[in-house]
Image (tube, grey):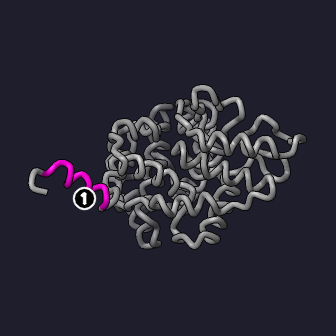
Amino acid sequence: MRSPAVKRFLNYLQVERSASAYTLQNYALDLHQFFEFLGNRNLSSITPLEIRKFVAHLSTQQHSRATIARRLSCLRSFFRYLCREGTLEHNPAVSIPTPRQEKRLPSFLDERQMMVLLEAPQKEKWQGLRDRAMLETLYSTGIRASELVGLNQEDLDEISGTVVVRGKGRKERLCPIGQTALKRIHLYLSKRPKKLKVPYALFVSQKGTRLTLRQVDRLIADYVRQANLPSSISPHSLRHSFATHLLDRGADLRSVQELLGHASLSTTQIYTHVTPQRLKKVYEQAHPRA
């Protein structure tokens, strides 16, 4: 059962911070697990040592470092909120170090594999045309799958070749979109049913509702399997492929940062691993003794 303090905190996140339902659900679960670990305790009696014990407990439960970091971030935010409203004088989580994150290279497709995936959807039915348009849009723009499902028809500007994208924190950005993707979208829209529950949505399901993130995940997983591509490929892999292929063909990192909508260049730098082919090309072009 949620304590009054937790209820106030979640209400604050929803009303004042415009947190998504997904974020609220995760924070509620994180706090429930924390207080279940501590038992029935007064908030003012919680110490940094007990938070460290909770972090150690998560480690023994084989939780990933990313999960532990997220739960620690939740606790920091929760106790900071309690300090701000005057319930607590000190934040017991503020001094707890965040676990160092594992650096994972993003999975991506090379250009040949990307073409194989794009050709996977069947073109006989409108759903196949939709899926081809969806894949082309993800690869052409580098947007997240969560941004894709939020697109409306009015977000597309065929004349300028751009699309309005609503990213994290409800920030809007303008992304270029290629002519191939626009043609695929146009063909899909001309064939999809006229009677829809959300006719303004760009990508819709068979039931006429907006396509969901889970449906996109499942569709891409099916096409990856059909195309006999690595099982590690996900919707986000198309974003990685977009960035990697741009860098392979000479795009500068700052431009790729803008296209991806990253706030920090350090986030984009994960793509500088790129491919041996690019490194060899740069070497041959730049080294005097290559």
From the top left corner, tell me how far across and down residue 3 is, in percent.
62, 48
- Residue 219 point in image, percent of width and height: 68, 61
Residue at the spot 43% in from the left edge and 62% down from the top edge: 54
Question: In the image as oriented, which residue stretches furthest toward the top?
Answer: 159
Q: Is residue 145 visible?
A: yes
Which of the image's four quarters has the C terminus?
A: bottom left
Q: Is residue 149 magenta?
A: no
Query: Mark 1 is on which residue type?
Result: Lys
Quarter of the figure that contains the N terminus: bottom right
Report the residue at 58% width, 42% height from top.
5
Residues 1 and 287: in front is: 287
Helix, strand or loop for disc 1:
helix
Q: In the visual, does 175 lie left or right of 99?
A: right
Q: Nearer the viewer, residue 118 or 50?
A: 118
Magenta stretch, main secondary structure, is: helix
Circle 1 is placed at which residue position?
Answer: 280
- The magenta region covers 277-287
The image shows residue 36, relative to residue 77, as above or below, that is below
Q: Residue at x 54, y 49 (%)?
A: 139
